[in-house]
Image: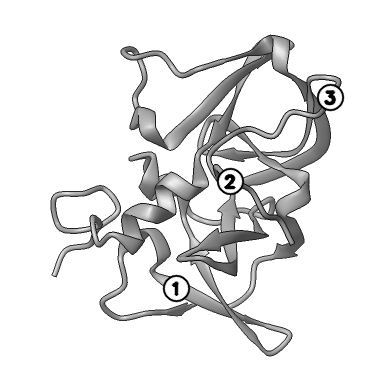
Amino acid sequence: MMSMTDPSATRWDEAGQLEVLTFDIGDERLAIEAISIREILDLLPETPVPGAPALVGSVINFRGKIIPIADLHVAFGMPIEDPSPDTRIVVIETLLGGEETQIGLRADKVYEVTLLDRDSASAPPVIGMRWRRTFVRELVRQDQSVIVLPDLPAIFATLERGHAGLDSPLGHAA
């Protein structure tokens, strides 16, 4: 299990690299630290949770364990896409409310585990982004594209603090 002092800090290794799993949400390429990945699943039947915020509006039963499903389309204010044959659930383990928790992230397409270089990373710009800056930890240039390192602790903290109300993209309509 991971233990860290700042859950939002990127944990580059001594060589300035970070091993990540890359995946798409809409037309954006995101990456999550490989160390936090527990499973990559084909789509499973989801059970909607009445009254839950749109970000985590359903759960799956995987090997007898109930896992909430987070849709990062909601966090980033992107249109929710219908599942395709490439859609997967990336099960991660993260610290929420001081407790290690498994959460499934719906991904439109999963690619590979790869290494990112700290020299190619930069903080998100103050302006010019279509998402909440606080939800993006770093942007990393790779080949001809930019990979987004989402700040999952910041995204999920909005749920813990109850900031996922009606005026929030993480909320739901009553």
User: Would you identify the image quadrant in which residue 12 lies?
Assistant: top right
Question: Is residue 59 left or right of 12 when viewed as pictured?
Answer: left
Residue in the picture at 65% in, 85% down: 65
Q: Please state which of the two labelled residues, at mark 1 or mark 3, is closer to the viewer.
A: 3
**Which percent across, then down, holds residue 19?**
80, 35
Q: Please state which of the two labelled residues, at mark 2 or mark 1, is closer to the viewer.
A: 2
Residue bearing mark 2: 5
What quarter of the picture does the C terminus occupy? Answer: bottom left
Q: CA distance from mark 2 to mark 1?
A: 30 Å
Which kind of residue does numbered mark 2 sit on?
Thr
What quarter of the picture does the N terminus occupy? Answer: bottom right
Q: Is residue 171 above or below residue 25?
A: below
Q: Please tell me how crowded label 1 is: few (under 14), some (14-19), or many (20+) other residues with Cα within 10 Å.
A: many
Q: Which mark is residue 48?
A: none
**Which percent across, then down, holds residue 129?**
36, 19
Q: Is residue 14 above or below residue 80?
A: above
Which kind of residue does numbered mark 3 sit on?
Glu
Q: CA distance from mark 2 to mark 3?
A: 18 Å
Contact check, label 2 and label 1, Cβ < 8 Å: no
Q: Which mark is residue 14?
A: 3
Along the polypeptide, which appears first: circle 2 or circle 3?
Answer: 2
Per the image, label 1 sits on a secondary structure element best described as: strand
Q: CA distance from mark 1 to mark 3?
A: 39 Å
Residue bearing mark 1: 58
